[in-house]
Every structure is written in C-alpha cells, then in structure tokens.
Amino acid sequence: MGLVRAVAVLVTFCGMMLGTAEAGVINITAGVLNTPNLGKVVATSTSTFRVDAASGTVTETGSATRIPNASVTTPQYIITCTGSGSPCSTSKLVTVTIQANTTSGPAFLAALNVSVSSGTLTSGPTGQNTQTVSFIAKSAAPGGTVAVFNLGMDVTIPATATGSKPTPAYTITTTNN
Amino acid sequence: MTCILVAVLACAMADGTAIGPSSVSRSASGSVTISKVISAARTRILNFGHFKNTGGGDCTASTITLDARTGLRSTTGSAVLAGGTAGSGAYTISGSANSIYGVSFPAVALSSPHTLTVSAFRFYSATNNSTTMGRIGPGGTDTPHVGATIFVPCSFDTHNINEVVASFTLTVTYP
C-alpha cells in the first residue's frame, strides 16, 4: 500500500512538470535563397571568389574576372528559441554548424566563413575557411535570440564551367544539448 | 520498486531534458552566372577606299565618314570619292549566348598607307539598337560593323590605293 502511494505521488509530481515545462524549440530563419549572388563571372582557369561574411567584399584567386567586382550582400541567419522549456534556457548550449553540400560541379563552396554579430559564444567559430564551420552559443530566454550570424563563402569555379547559372548549396544545422 | 523506476524514467523523459540533443536544419544556396570569355575577331578591315583632293589652291581640308550600318561614305571639304573597295570593318564577337556586351574604341587611330588621322569610330550591331552595345546571339556570336571618320588634309595626294585602318584597339566587355 505504501509503495502504491509513493508511485502515485511521483506520477502526480511528474504530471505537474508536464503542465509547467512546455518544450522549447530552436528556430533558424528561413533560408536566404541565391545569396550571395556573385553576378557574372568569366573564368579562363579554375578560380575562387572569397566572399567575406562581415563585409561582403569579394576577393579573387585565379584568372577569373567578375563583372563588376563590387561587394555583395551576405545571407544573415537568426537562431531563436521559442517555448519555455529546454533548450530555451541560458544554461543550455546550441551548436550551430554550417556545411557546404558539394565539393564539385560548375560552382561549389570550397569553404565557408561566418561572422557572428549577436549571441554569447562559448566556442568558435571554428573551421573558418573550411567546408564546415561551427560555433557554440548559449541558449537564451524563451523568445530570445541565440545568435545572429552572416555567412561568407569561397566559391570555386572550374574553367570548363561556362554558360551556366549554378546555385551552390549549404546546410545550417543547430544541435542543442 | 520496478514501478518507481519506470515512473521516474517516464517523468524525466516528459521534461525533455534527458532525451538527448535535438537538431534543426535549413538549406540554402548562393548564386553565380558563369559566362564564356568574350572575344573579337576581325573579318573585314575598315576601308575608306580611294579618294582624292580637288579644288587646287582653293582646297579645304576634308573628312570622309564611313557609315557603320550601310558601309556608305560621305564627304565634307574638297575631297571626292574615287572608287576602291570601301567598306565598314566587320567583326565576329564570341561569348555567352544572348549576352549584352559593351564596345569601346580609341579616340584616334592612324590609317595606312598615308597615316591619316581616323576618329569618331561608330558601331552598329543588327542585334541591338545602340552605338555602344551589342547582343551576342543564341549561337554565341554577333557580327557587328564599325565605321569611322578620316581626316584628309589638302596636302594629301592620292595614289589610288585603298586607305585602310589596319590597327586599332576594339574593346568588348560584358557590362
């Protein structure tokens, strides 16, 4: 009888927790399609254009020419937390990883770089100017912003890739503890 | 006792903290347009043909203008046209299909063989109604024409030789 009472108390306590601790959810703002847009380039040999995440400036390696060679708008992403339960708590950590999807094709992302403009980082960004960049930010209060970052990238264009309009892809993943 | 353990486990899972990490992903892409290298090849030289001075001691300096579109010549001053094989310059521009391109010329060039001053280059492409731009066709080429104006001083003495513009820099670029 005593054992049954103990279980009943525990179940009741558990039910109270269910009622008060609504699960939190990490959100990433919608993907920014076709950004940055490097515009028109002419490549006579394999060349790479590096877009700086913070400034949008484009620097060129190789013989390619970009017309005109002006700064571009880099995609900005906002990681937020909704809900009042975990992981929307400042004691939690959110790992943000950006991964280039391909390593070949008429234009591919040879590397990525990020500029974090808001958020409390506990690690990184690591892997800058490689194909996988990540950082860890502390989670925030419900409804708060975990991190705001801009994404830059190295776009490599093989000499043979003429007359096309490729859209090299990447994936952003958040993982919370 | 087993009941208590099951209940504790269920309780912990309901909180969401003991389930383990969760992930959210988004995909997006950049964008770039890769164009072919643009180039120009001359297929016909810019040729003012034959002309000569008239007027003797009353000569006034002349100009001969070669129309880029029609290839016809017009004159001012004492010079008169005298045959030859006059014609606008013709070029083949190669590059990315359906692309607009811009063209520019030197301010001044010299003719051959009499080293006359040539200026006011003019451009005509049937694909684009502009004096400074053309459009590469679906096949990856365009065939514009180039005209100009040649200055003929009274000291010029013709020898019935075609007066051509053998060398000048025609610059084509994607805008």
Image (cartoon, grey):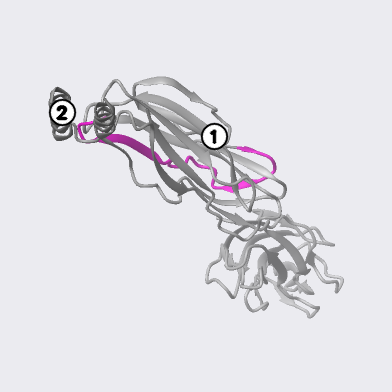
Q: Which residue is mark 2?
A: A4
**Can you say whether B19 is above or below A122 in the image?**
below
Secondary structure of residue under mark 1: strand
> Of discs 1 and 2, which sits in the foreground?
2
For the C terminus of chain A, the quadrant is top left
Whether residue B45 is visible: no
Residue in the image at 38% along x and 32% along y: B21
**Can you say whether A65 is above or below B172 in the image?**
above
Q: Which residue is mark 1?
A: A132
Labels 1 and 2: the sequence-earlier one: 2
Alpha-carbon span between mark 1 and mark 2: 53 Å
| Image position, residue B48 (x, y; %) | 75, 71
- At label 2, which amino acid type do we have? Val
Q: Is residue A31 left or right of residue A110?
A: left
Q: Which residues are magenta?
A: A60-86
Residue A66 in magenta? Answer: yes
Comparing B136 with B32, the one in front is B32
